[in-house]
Image (spheres, rainbow, N blue to C red):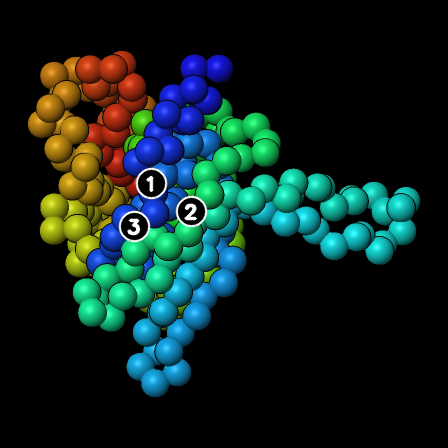
Amino acid sequence: MNFYLNAASMIGYLKNGMEFDSWEEAWKFRVDYGGKMGFGVRKDYSNKNRKDEVVTSEKFVCNKDGFWEIDKRDHLYKAPRVETRTGCRVAMKIVFDRKKCKYHVSDFNGEHYHDLHAPICVHLLRCQRSITKSQAEEVDLAYDAELTQKKSFAFFSVKSRGREHVGFLLLDQKKLPSDQRGRGLQFGKVGSLLMSFKDQASQDPSFFYAFQLDNEEQITNIFWADGRMRMDYELFGDIVTFYPTFATNKDHRPLEVFIGFNHYREQVIFRASLLYDET
C-alpha cells in the first residue's frame, strides 16, 4: 500500500511544459518514471516531418491503454488471449519546438484506472527489459562456450546479483538474434570462443582473458574476468569461494567460478574459467 502512496506522490515530477533535449531522452524518462510508478509504457504514435525526418510529436501511453479487438477464435481454443488492457487513459504527449530545438510535454494525464505493479515485479514489464550491446556479446560468449541458455542465464543472474537486475529475461535471451553463432563452423569451438573474447574486450577495456596450452600447443583451460568482476574483487576479495561445478557445457566441460559476497551479502563473481583439461 505504501508503494502506491509513494507512486501517487511522484506525479508532480512530470507535468506539462517539462522539456527534453530529444525524443529518446523523453522516452527514457517516461520508461524510468513508469518503472518507479509501477506501470508499463508503450508508444502510441509518432509524427515526422517529411523533409528532414525530425520527430515533430509523439505520444507515450500506459501499456493498459485501449482494448484488444474481440477474439474471433473458437471459444474452446486451449490458449485464449489474456485480457491485459483496461482502457487506461494515462498518456504523455511531447511536441518539438523548433525555436528552442527541444521537446516539451504538451499533454499529460497521470490518473490510472487499474492497480499498479509491485516493485519486485516491475523488471518483468516489457518496456523495462532490454539487452545491451555488451550483454549481447556475453550471450554470444556463453554460446561459443557451448553453455545452455538456462545455465548461461543463471551465470548472468549471479553476476548481476539477482534476476531482477539482469535487465532481461531468459525468454528475451532465447529470442536474441546473433550474427556470430555461425563462427564455430569457420574458426572451430575454441577459435569462436576467442573471437567472442576479442569482441568483449573491444566493448570493455577492463576485460581480461588468458588461456593455457598443453605440450602440443592446444588450448586446455580458459580464464576471463570483465571490468565489473575485477572491481568487485578489489572491493570484496578478502574471502573467495571456489565453485568448481557451477555449470557444464554440452561437452560436459565444467564452468568454474570464484565467488565472494559484497556488503549486502549478495553473491558476486570475481572470475570464471572453462576447463578443457580438468587435471
Q: In the image, which is nearer the foreground, mark 1 or mark 3?
A: 3
Nearer to the camera, 244 or 53 = 53
Instruction: Residue under label 1, please give it.
Output: 14
Placement of 2 over or under 111, stated as above or below: above
Q: CA distance from mark 2 to mark 3?
A: 9 Å
Q: Outermost residue toward the left?
A: 234
Cβ atoms under marks 1 and 2 closer than 8 Å: yes
Residue 165 screen position, x and y as percent: 35, 33
Q: Secondary structure at mark 2?
A: strand
Numbered circle sitting on residue 39: none
Residue 180 appears anywhere in the view: yes
Q: Secondary structure at mark 1?
A: loop
Q: Residues within 10 Å of mark 2 (few under 14, many from 20)?
A: some
Residue 121 falls left or right of residue 191: right
Identify the residue at horizontal 51%, vertical 54% (top origin): 175
Placement of 160 over or under 2, stated as above or below: below
Residue 150 falls left or right of residue 49: right
Identify the residue at horizontal 9%, vertical 27% (top origin): 234
Residue 65 screen position, x and y as percent: 58, 47
Q: Secondary structure at mark 3?
A: loop
Numbered circle sitting on residue 108: 2
Identify the residue at horizontal 31%, vertical 65% (top origin): 96
Amino acid type at mark 2: Phe
Amino acid type at mark 3: Gly
Identify the residue at horizontal 51%, vertical 58% (top origin): 44
For marks 1 and 2 on the same chain, the one whose residue lies earlier in the sequence: 1
Nearer to the camera, 48 or 181 = 48
Q: Where is residue 265, by image quadrant?
A: top left
Instruction: Residue under label 3, please give it.
Output: 17
In the picture, the quarter occupied by the C terminus is top left
Placement of 119 over or under 141, stated as above or below: above
Q: Outermost residue toward the bottom?
A: 51
